Amino acid sequence: MSETSGTRNVRSFVHAGAGARSDTHALRNLAVSLGVLWSVAFVVVGLHYHLQLYADGSLFSYAVATQDAWAFHWHNISGRVFVYLYAYLPSQAYVGLFNDAWGGVVVYGFLFFIAPLLGLIATYVADRSENRIIFVYACASTATLCPLVFGFPTEVWISHALFWPALALCRHARSTLGGAVLVFLTMLALSLTHGGALLFIMAIIVTLALRGTRDPAFLRGIGTFFLVLAVWSTIKEAIPPDAYLAKVLRNAALHVFDISILDGALMLLLGGALASYAAAFFLFQRLSGDNIPAEKVHVYAASVVVVGLAVYWLGFDHALHADNRYYLRTVLLIVTPGFGMLAASSMLATENRLDLPRSLLRLVPLMHHGVTVRLAAGALSLVTLVQVVETGKFVAGWTEYTAAVQKLVMSAASDPALGNDSLVSSSRIDKELNRLSWSSTTPYLSVLLAPKLKPRRLIADPDSGFFWLSCRTATANLRAERAVPVESRHLVQMEACLHRR
């Protein structure tokens, strides 16, 4: 394609000015640093505080400990089989080799929490763009989006980790049979993490189209997508979910894009902080001069918002970002492709290969303008501050909640009205702490938090309307040789048989 005046202007702007390059370089370093630091923190914090046990993670961890993840749940979500192969199968293998149930839970947590870091490493290796632009955006996406769901074992966590190396490979893999196979396998793995990952793949195809629909990478990508879709559909059709779970999964799928999740406390806090920052930024921008240097406007604006956040947290905050971590997987599904589009547009503009109408090309330089770059740097810093504080609150609350659970399961308290003397009601735990509870998985958390995995009681939520295990499945597990004490598995079997024959 011949170089038009529009693309020449875009490229010259991208490479323009020492000041603009300095601002862009600083933003790039900030994004990379935060992405890598968060990725390391996920592993350290997650394992130290046993966050792999949070919410559905209790059932998943118990399934690993009892070496029955496929029978317990994963046969119901065959379309996410890559996550099973990546995190659950190796963890169960560890339990079988060393007869160490808790060690398998730790291995499972490690594999799950380290996924973003592995994704960034793979993206760095696969990205051959100038200044590794895709890797930089991958770091920014990891730093801003992954903390929203950190702690909840959603498979979208793995989807996000795979999206970025898949994007880089689809653009830069060699035009050989080996390159085509690598693209196919990566795209297939991505599709088999979560149904919503198909949106990620379609976003990748759209980014490839930015180089033109006759570009070899686009043609390879679109052909691979249809092949992957055929394999994905075959697996889903061959291994359908149980009747009990099918309805639950269908209802969950219908609410994946429920807009009501955006009115949660954390999203409102982030929205308010960013809106306030933008208003302060443009106010200081208008007032910039000798007293307020233009290159420091974002610092002044962010400082004002930090003061406001401190007042809110110290004087008015009573919210806790806990159960909404599950629902905010929707934000990852929607916003991650947006980051991918920005990464591809920025990269292709730098390479002078962006195939867009001239009217749209004129918008690209705004991404690299000094004002935009400084505005983004301040916004990224504020988002990070909010995420760090809210994650700290979540971890502190989780620590207190698990201590209360451990105390209750080893006590003599009992609530026979729940159906058995070995059950105790979760309502005995303080209401504030119970904000960290997950009604359907507290029985499994009871086992995992007990010394030597042998609780005196199982905690049950009297209001729970969903039960993971059928009596048949739990009984089969009880009769098998497993590393988890038989007494504990008998308690789980008893609770399952009370609700699902």
Image (tube, helix red, strand yellow):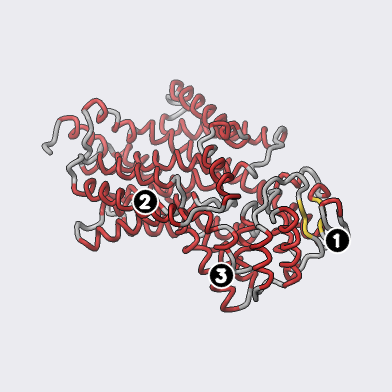
Mark 1 surroundings within 10 Å by alpha-carbon count, few (fewer than 14), some (14 through 19), many (20 or more): few
Instruction: Give me the residue at 87% from left, 56% from top.
Output: 414
Q: Secondary structure at mark 3?
A: helix
First in sequence: mark 1 vs mark 3? 3
Instruction: Give me the residue at 42% from left, 35% from top.
Output: 374
First in sequence: mark 2 vs mark 1? 2
State the residue position of label 2: 135
Instruction: Give me the residue at 53% from left, 43% from top.
Output: 250
State the residue position of label 1: 411
**Residue 230: horizontal and vertical position, in percent?**
34, 51
Q: Nearer the viewer, residue 306 or 359?
A: 359
**Residue 45: horizontal and vertical position, in percent?**
60, 57
Does the residue at mark 2 contact the one at mark 1 (Cβ under 8 Å)? no
Q: Mark 2 to mark 3: distance in Å?
A: 33 Å
Tag shown at residue 92: 3
Q: Nearer the viewer, residue 184 or 19?
A: 184
Q: Secondary structure at mark 2?
A: helix
**Residue 103: horizontal and vertical position, in percent?**
61, 71
Q: Residue 188's quadrant in the figure?
A: bottom left
Q: Residue 269's quadrant in the figure?
A: top right
Work out which residue is located at the far right of the displayed protein and give it.
412
Q: Is residue 38 visible?
A: no
* Amino acid type assigned to the residue bearing label 3 in the image: Gln
Q: Is residue 316 visible?
A: yes
Q: Nearer the viewer, residue 273 or 483?
A: 483
**Residue 187: horizontal and vertical position, in percent?**
35, 54
In the image, residue 13 sits, relative to residue 416, either above or below, namely above
* Amino acid type assigned to the residue bearing label 1 in the image: Ser
